Image (tube, rainbow, N blue to C red):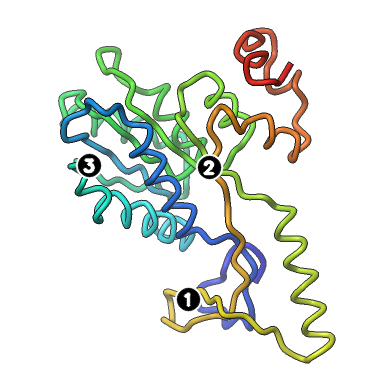
Amino acid sequence: DYENLTLGGGADYHLGFDLVSVGVEQGRALLECLPEKTNKPRVVYLNGSPTDVNATLLKLGYAEILEGTEGKKARVSIIDDQSVPNWAEDEVPDIVKLVWARRDNNVDGLVAASDGIAISALTSLPNKATPPVVVAQGATLAGLQAVIDGRLCATVFKPVSELALGAVDIATQIRDTGFFETEDSLIDIATNVPVPARLVTAQVVRAEQVADVARETAISTTELCGEERQVACTKLGLS
């Protein structure tokens, strides 16, 4: 399977991103982004689809950090944990309205399973709510723009070029030896069977890394910055 593991599909090999690691990076980025003076930061999860293994793996990663030793040291409190059916961004406003209402608009941090979910959440906040510190993943054009604007503290970039190199390596090994040798595996949560895998790591993207990601993904400065971000983009070496 390539990128997305088919649950119960019996794949011989899997090539994709280490999504647990992506979630770990999200969790650590949130801890680093939260102001030091924040006392007992109140954090909300907006997960991906509850039926998608990718969303499950991402959450395993950020929950490991925020609910583990590092989160406890920072006295993080997970005050709400919501999933977005089918990753549907148009479902996010209703979820945000409900969560923020029952939390009295008092949310310090938000982990979003995608850039799109994060941006939809930010545009749906009640007028009286102070925007929380937000981390997401995907490094989409909109996500990178939100990082430049300061609406997202960080996103996570998954380099597709590394998947291509991994595919070549797997194909070469199978051609030469008849099998693919790897120490990595991904558990098929439908069968609880480990699938031999090549898992590609990702990188956190803050404002200082946007220029590098833009170059790697061939996003033009004009497309990324426009007239409204010229000052910020110039400071980041994107002019």
Q: Is residue 174 above or below residue 167?
A: below
**Marks 1 and 2, the one that precedes in the sequence:** 1
Closest to the observer, 65 or 43: 65
Q: Which residue is drawn at 79% across and 91% down?
A: 177
**Kind of residue at disc 1:** Asp
Q: Is the residue under label 2 in contact with that under label 3 (CB below 8 Å)? A: no
Q: Which residue is drawn at 58% across and 60% down?
A: 17
Name the image quarter holding the C terminus.
Answer: top right
**Marks 3 and 2, the one that precedes in the sequence:** 3
Q: Residue at x 84, y 85 (%)?
A: 175
Mark 1 or 2, which is nearer the eye? 2
Secondary structure beneath dot 2 equals strand
Q: How far apart are marks 3 and 2 (CA)?
A: 20 Å
Density class for disc 3 (Cα within 10 Å; few <14, some 14-19, many ≥20) is: some
The residue beneath circle 2 is 204
**Kind of residue at disc 2:** Val
Q: Which mark is residue 188?
A: 1
Q: Residue 74 carries which label?
A: 3
* Percent x, y of residue 5: 57, 69
Density class for disc 2 (Cα within 10 Å; few <14, some 14-19, many ≥20) is: many
**Marks 1 and 3, the one that precedes in the sequence:** 3
